[in-house]
Amino acid sequence: MVVTIRTFGNLIRQFPLGNLATNREIAIASCEIILTIVSPITAPEIWADTQINLAVAYNDRILGDKANNQKLSIDCCQSALKLYNRKDFPSKWAGIQNNLGNAYCEWIRGGRAENLEMAISYFRAALEIRTRHGSLEEWAETKNNLATVYLNRIRGDKSENIEIAISYFRAVLEAITRQNFSEQWAMTQGNLATAYTNRIRGDKGDNLKLSIECSLSTLKVYTQQDFPGNWAMTQNNLALTYQKIDRIDESIDCFQSALEVYDRQNFPEECLRTANNLGNLAFKQSNWQLAIESYDRAIQAVEISRGWARVENRQEILRDAISVYQNVIQACINYGQIDKAIEYSERARSRQLVDFMATNDLYRDGEIPAEVRTLQAEYESLQQQIYIQQRTETANENRQLTPTRDSRAIQQVSEHIQALEAQKQTVWRKIRAVDPQLAEQQQVTPIDLPTIQQLITTESTAILSLYTTDNDTHIFIITRDNQPQIHTCQGEGAGELQLWLWENWLNPYVNDRSAWADNMPEILAQLAQRLQLDRLVAKLTDITELIIIPHLYLHQIPFAALPINPLANESAEPNPLLGGVPVGRGGFRGGFRRGFLGDKFTIRSVPSCQILKYCLDRSPITMPQYGTVENADGTLPGAGFEGKQIAELFQIESDYRLQGRKQATVTAFDNLIERTDKPITTLHLANHASSRLDNPLESAVSLADGNISLAKLMMSRYRHLREIFLSCCETHLGSTNITDDLLTLSTGFLCAGASTVIGTLWVVDDLATALFSTFYYLNRHAGFDRVIALKMAQVRLRDLTGDEFKLHHSEDLKNHFQAYAQANRIDRAEFKAEFERGEVDKATFDRETHRLTNAYRGALDSTKTLDRYCQSDRPFSHPFYWAGFTCQGLG
């Protein structure tokens, strides 16, 4: 029985029919069955041979993580060496050395240069046994492998390494012939062709001619019928060589021949590489139709590979192939197929978020499995340990909080916290791996233009989908009933516009927030010019609402504050409330004849149209049930004020309000969200929050005894929650990578089940946010839609005069702050008495005293600030105060 299974495993691994990926999985499974039956003691040679077969199967495996498969292959070889030592089994030992050399040639972990040196050492060891006068075929195989390493070697002189490789290939061809070792001969001819193509010494034209001759010799053995994979590889190599000598038609023919074998299902990596090569060649020739067809084939291969890969490796696959998407989008534009360009741009962006939303929506009507819940509990325990450690460090540092909702972006944490975070990330990956809904998830069907247009519910709404390629930034204008238009900002590509945004927006925000705020009006005016905003707006006739899909760093921009028709040389006065930030620089106090983009349109944004579709597909709110989580750590007096206003406006019951450090705990939050009697549909969070640009999954909203991290949101399924206002700092701030996945707290709540999230793009002011939130909910209470309510609140806060502030708001705020300060004085006295009675320890006493002192001082500082606001012309006119609020999802 064992022999039969072993033979079956070898046969399946090499079997040419059926799905190649499936065949190799069967081969691995058959080998693993053998290893459950035999052991190094009961059947040592069968056990060792199976380890060798399993090593080869893992090395050839298509599914799973490539690096992990390579590591498993190496481990199996090392296991086989426990029996097959050099003294007793020289031939077997040499074969394993050869296999290890092959494994290190391809291993993607560790240093590439060091891996190749390891491969050389293994091949040289094998050649001590495999000699030309012994087993000629085995010698030729290993000599060929060694030559290939020298061809790719990093260390040493490159031209000399290539010459060594050529000499080894020639030596093999002198010893074997096409008649006696046809496959080895053909393989060596192919490798020699590659060596001549890359040769540095000698005449380039002569070398390329020799390369073509070798490739054509290879095809005498590698026919499409007998050796389809090798035949296709040779066709691809020939195509590249023909391209170098401008024999374009022959190059195209060879690429297309290779793709007859390299289908996306069985050879996804080879299909991607070859189709991309053909697409690039067609692109250079302005053959847009062929370019689009080729890139489309490559993209299908990418998406199949991504679907097969483990969750944590999917982004890497997409990142490595992002140029294919960029090129096909540009080719479609050049060919006049704007609809296809839009569809490909959708396939390129926010795929990780789409995966999360697709998976989480599967749980809407079902229970989370017990195994997942156990891992989630482990995750929460680690998170709590991290939170306690962070609080201890904060108390020790004796930091002073300000009334502004403070940021900890790009923060440095201790080694202990880093170790806990590493453990937590491991648990998080386990959750994603064992989640059966995720495991069974099918590929998300790409969204097409007709479906996108169906997402637009009114004739006066337009989607603006932005996409930056290497050279330009394109803005696709999509309406419900008309053909899409394109607005191209030429020369504003990734190396220009996106780099400019990094240097002038995100980097200053992180490193010098005062200068960032000071320069905000000017930078926004420059961005409006770069995007040619006036020309764009002129195309938006009869449009009143914009759904904006930003790209890369454009996600961080407050589009509502982009100026239209700026007046040149407009003077500006400094705003003392911002420490010198101009109130009207660039026209922010009457310096724009037609104001801002947000004055002309209501604006919301989404990461992609696919995500907008998920938001629309979720059940709407029929009977809103409000809940609030307010001022969890007691240091935000403005947050307490807005919570009170909202609760009175909507008659929110006390058990739906979590107030302060005694109520706003993690457990209480979870219980509030998971209530089944009158479940929460609309949630207002007014607390500290921070974006971790260095580790987005650790971005979090702070509660009294812990936090709600983005990673937790990605694992959560909030069945009833639909509308959220994150009245906190940086809840929609995130650094996007090349795949354009914006991982923020706002998008995290969308993944968890919300349809609409209002978040913030930066650290927002406590008092201004309290006013803004109050204005917003007054508008909602009056019956206005979310985006209209948002726009009206922004305009009202921006245009609020000092006299109006004094007349309508100052007195109520002053009374609130004074009562708040007095309550904190009482809390400090009570806490001191508890400490003196021995009811709390010294560390807790120091931490809580520090917090209460900061809260007291913050309330007093806020009271003093009120007088300055009253004396200012328009105290909140600077975009810092009003422009950072953004609506994600539905309007």
Image (cartoon, rainbow, N blue to C red):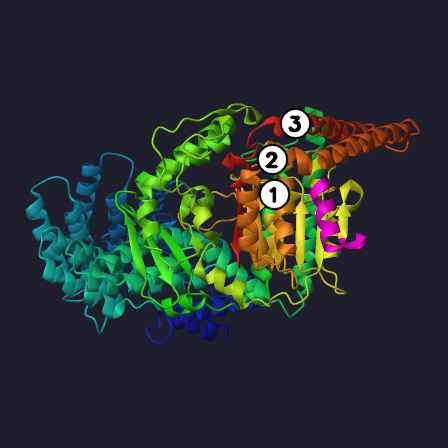
Residue 564 in view of the camera = yes
Judge by depth and name the residue closer to the eye, 560 or 62.
560
Q: Give the distance between the C-alpha atoms of the residues marked 3 and 2, in whole angstroms.
A: 12 Å
Residue type marked 3: Thr
- Is 142 contained in the magenta span? no
Marks 3 and 1 in Cβ contact (< 8 Å): no
- Binning the other alpha carbons within 10 Å of mark 3 as few (below 14), some (14 to 19) or many (20 upward) gives some
Circle 3 is placed at which residue position?
865
**Mark 3 or mark 2: whose residue is earlier in sequence:** 2
Q: Looking at the image, is 517 positioned above or below residue 5?
A: above
**Mark 1 or mark 2: whose residue is earlier in sequence:** 2
Q: Looking at the image, is 822 positioned above or below residue 282?
A: above
Circle 1 is placed at which residue position?
772
- Is 647 contained in the magenta span? yes
Residue at x 34% of width, y 31% of height? 568
Q: Give the distance between the C-alpha atoms of the residues marked 3 and 1, in whole angstroms.
A: 17 Å
**Image location of residue 247, percent across then percent down:** 8, 57
- Which residues lie in the magenta part? 640-656
Q: Quadrant of residue 77?
A: bottom left
Q: Looking at the image, is 20 positioned above or below residue 475?
A: below
Residue type marked 1: Phe
**Mark 3 or mark 1: whose residue is earlier in sequence:** 1
Marks 1 and 2 in Cβ contact (< 8 Å): no
**Image location of residue 706, percent across then percent down:** 71, 43
Judge by depth and name the residue closer to the eye, 635 or 302.
635
Predominant SS along the magenta part: helix
Which disc is residue 239 wearing?
none
Circle 2 is placed at which residue position?
765
